[in-house]
Amino acid sequence: MGKYEEIKEVYNRLFQLDPRLWADLRKASPRDIVRRTEVRFNEPDRTYEVPFLNRRYTVDGIHEAIRIDDRDTEPAIDFQVQLVLMTYLSRAGELVPLGRMVTEKELKGGVTFFQGPHKLNTAPLLRRFGRNPRAFINAGRRLEGTVQGYGDASFVLPALPKIPVGFILYCGDDEFSPEMVVTFDASIEEHFQLDVVWALVNVTVEALLAVSQNDNDQDLGE
């Protein structure tokens, strides 16, 4: 088990959502939440429908439950997914994407925070795609990513309605190891604290790996 997997296991075993996230969700008006987050509110059952990567989650603030495919939160949805979803619904600000992508080190406090156990978990992507940019692009397309022209392969994913996340792959060769750069719209600081940014990247990396399983690297087209 790698370092990230150990941390994730601890998170899922020991951590629970801050109850204030649920309280804030219930206190806010649905109209305000929909305006800030660009999600859908289902009036009959008072739930929110949140598109997150390649799935749609139903968040029920009254019963404090998150469902996907009509399943209950536990154990199907891990803590980090819940954290990202609930923070987005309860705490997202007014700011819309600025169209300027930055790295984690350009976020306030990012140089200090994203080290050691909080280093962005790009190693699994490098192992899977470090010398296979076509498979990397295909995985991004499966998550509705927009292909970019940076590095050897790159795309921006619409992770949440107002939260784009970019990935840039620099392929390795006989002399250099592959590298991966993760970017965020500069507006992300208005919506997420750094620990939630870290969780967002973890979940997104897992989604990219999941959609690339059994990938025969067939070109998906432009």
Image (cartoon, helix red, strand yellow):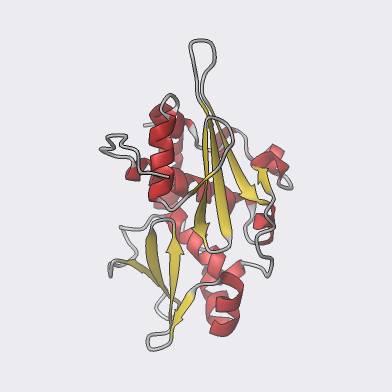
Say which quarter of the image contains residue 170: top right
Tell me what residue is drawn at x 44 percent, y 31 percent. 133
Tell me what residue is drawn at x 29 percent, y 39 percent. 213
Tell me what residue is drawn at x 32 percent, y 34 percent. 217
Say which quarter of the image contains residue 53: bottom left
Say which quarter of the image contains residue 118: top right
Q: Position of residue 56 (x, y in %)?
A: 38, 65
Residue 73 vertical position relative to residue 102 in the rendered view, above or below = below
In this rendered view, identify the residue nearer to me: 177 or 202: 177
Residue 83 vertical position relative to residue 8 in the rendered view, above or below = below
| Quarter of the image that includes the C terminus | top left
In this rendered view, identify the residue nearer to me: 157 or 182: 157
Residue 29 appears anywhere in the view = no
Report the side of 20 relative to 75 (left or right).
right
Residue 57 appears anywhere in the view = yes
Q: Position of residue 61 (x, y in %)?
A: 45, 77
Q: Position of residue 63 (x, y in %)?
A: 39, 78
Residue 92 vertical position relative to residue 128 in the rendered view, above or below = below
